[in-house]
Amino acid sequence: RVTAAIRTGPAPRVERLPRLLSRPVAVFGTAVLLVAISATLAFSPAARDAVADFLGIGGVRIEVGPSAGPTPTAAPGENLSLGVATSLEDAQERVDFDIRLPNVADLPAAPDSVYYSDFPVGGRVSLVYRARPGSLPETSTTGVGLLLTEFQGSIDGDFAKKLAVDQQAQATEVNGRLAIWVRGPHTVFFLDAEGRPQAESLRLSANALIWVDDGVTFRLESELTLKDSLTIAESMT
């Protein structure tokens, strides 16, 4: 209807203008046409469909269709240098120990992301959980609510003694086994599967609960309290 009205209407009186101005006037006429089409598209779905059938630029055809949706967000934990993103099944095939998962109401049955790394010896599995309003606060600006790391090894005795007198750490227990509660950023010193001392910084600027069970070291990092961290740790039987 728009194009029909324009075609049957009076032609622009371009011939009376100097030749130098004829091109700008033609361009102006095109601009008016585009404005008219835009206004029609905004208020008439039928016109929008009709115009979409013929309107194009070069080899590009303009079509009206549903939105492609929001841009996918980054996987939780991908900026923390945790290793290679993988699945629980693949990670379990890569390590000799049983991967344990928390079993509490505030966490899903499976983590939001899983990562595997060859360090330390025997491999390391990192389970990442997104922050959840009301139950799992976000740590710093990472979007991560909880990071659970599992690898073969044990707590370095000298490290444990140092933390015993550190005001930011305290000794506790997870299911009757020695555990260390660390408040804030720390470097973790441990013995790997071959008994060699290793050091690794906490990935999150958060609290950490560290314990060893059956030759596997567990490190739970979050902004949760000691009580809530112990509840999660003790559910991993």
Image (cartoon, rainbow, N blue to C red):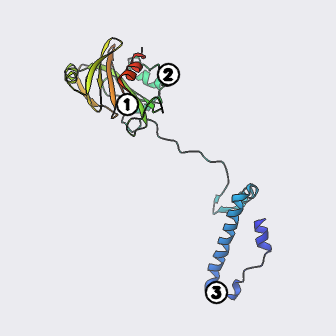
Residue type (three-letter) at the residue carrying disc 3: Arg
In the picture of the structure, the residue carrying the numbered disc 2 is 105
Residue type (three-letter) at the residue carrying disc 2: Ala
Quarter of the picture holding the C terminus:
top left
Disc 2 on helix, strand or loop? loop
In the picture of the structure, the residue carrying the numbered disc 3 is 19
Rounded to the nearest angstrom, the CA distance separating label 3 from label 1 is 74 Å
Nearest the eye: 37 or 105: 105
Question: Mark 2 or 1 closer to N-term?
Answer: 2
- Up/down of 145 relative to 196, above or below: below
- Up/down of 93 relative to 44, above or below: above
In the picture of the structure, the residue carrying the numbered disc 1 is 223
Quadrant of residue 232 in the image?
A: top left
- Up/down of 143 relative to 213, above or below: below
Q: Residue, x 30% and y 26% (percent of image)?
A: 120
Rounded to the nearest angstrom, the CA distance separating label 3 from label 2 is 79 Å
Nearest the eye: 140 or 129: 140
Question: Mark 3 or 2 closer to N-term?
Answer: 3
Q: Residue, x 72% and y 80% (percent of image)?
A: 12
Would residue 191 be seen by someone viewing this image from the given angle? Answer: no
Residue type (three-letter) at the residue carrying disc 1: Glu
Q: Residue, x 28% and y 30% (percent of image)?
A: 200
Disc 1 on helix, strand or loop? loop
Which label is found at residue 65?
Answer: none
